[in-house]
Image (cartoon, helix red, strand yellow):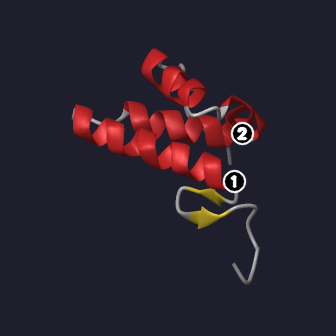
Amino acid sequence: MTQQRRPRQPLPAQVEDAIRTRGLRDAYDSRPPYQRNDYLLWINGAKREETQQKRIAQMLDELEQGDVYMRMDWPPGRRGR
C-alpha cells in the first residue's frame, strides 16, 4: 500500500503577515511540517474571503494557545485540560 502525500502548500502573504502581526512566527515554525501544511491547505481551500479569514483567525488562536491543533488536543493523548 502506498501512502499519498498532500501537496505542499505555499505560505500566502496574508497568512504570513497575520502570523507576524500576532508575534506567532516561532509558534508557527515549531509546529510539525504536516500541521503547517494542513493549516495552509485548509485556509487556501476556502472559497470565500470571509471563510478564509475565519480559518486564519482560528489558526492564530490555536498557535497562541499552543496546545491545540484543529480544535484537538495537541500533542495527542493529553488528558485533563
The part of the image, by quadrant, that contains residue 2 is top right
The part of the image, by quadrant, that contains residue 33 is top right
Instruction: Indicate the quadrant containing the C terminus: top left, top right, bottom left or bottom right.
Output: bottom right
- Disc ID at residue 27: 2
Question: Which residue occupies 41% across, 36% down?
Answer: 43
- Disc ID at residue 66: 1
Residue 40 position, x and y percent, is 50, 33
Of the residues under marks 1 and 2, which one precedes in the sequence? Answer: 2
Rendered view: 71 above or below 61: below
Between the C-alphas of marks 1 and 2, the distance is: 7 Å
Q: Is residue 54 left or right of residue 69?
A: left
**Label 2 secondary element:** helix
Residue 42 position, x and y percent, is 44, 40
Query: Which one is in front, 34 or 50?
Result: 50
- Disc ID at residue 56: none
The part of the image, by quadrant, that contains residue 80 is bottom right
Query: Which one is in front, 9 or 52?
Result: 52
Question: Which residue occupies 36% across, 35% down?
Answer: 45
Question: Which residue occupies 53% across, 62% down?
Answer: 71
**Label 1 secondary element:** loop
Question: Which residue occupies 59% across, 65% down?
Answer: 72
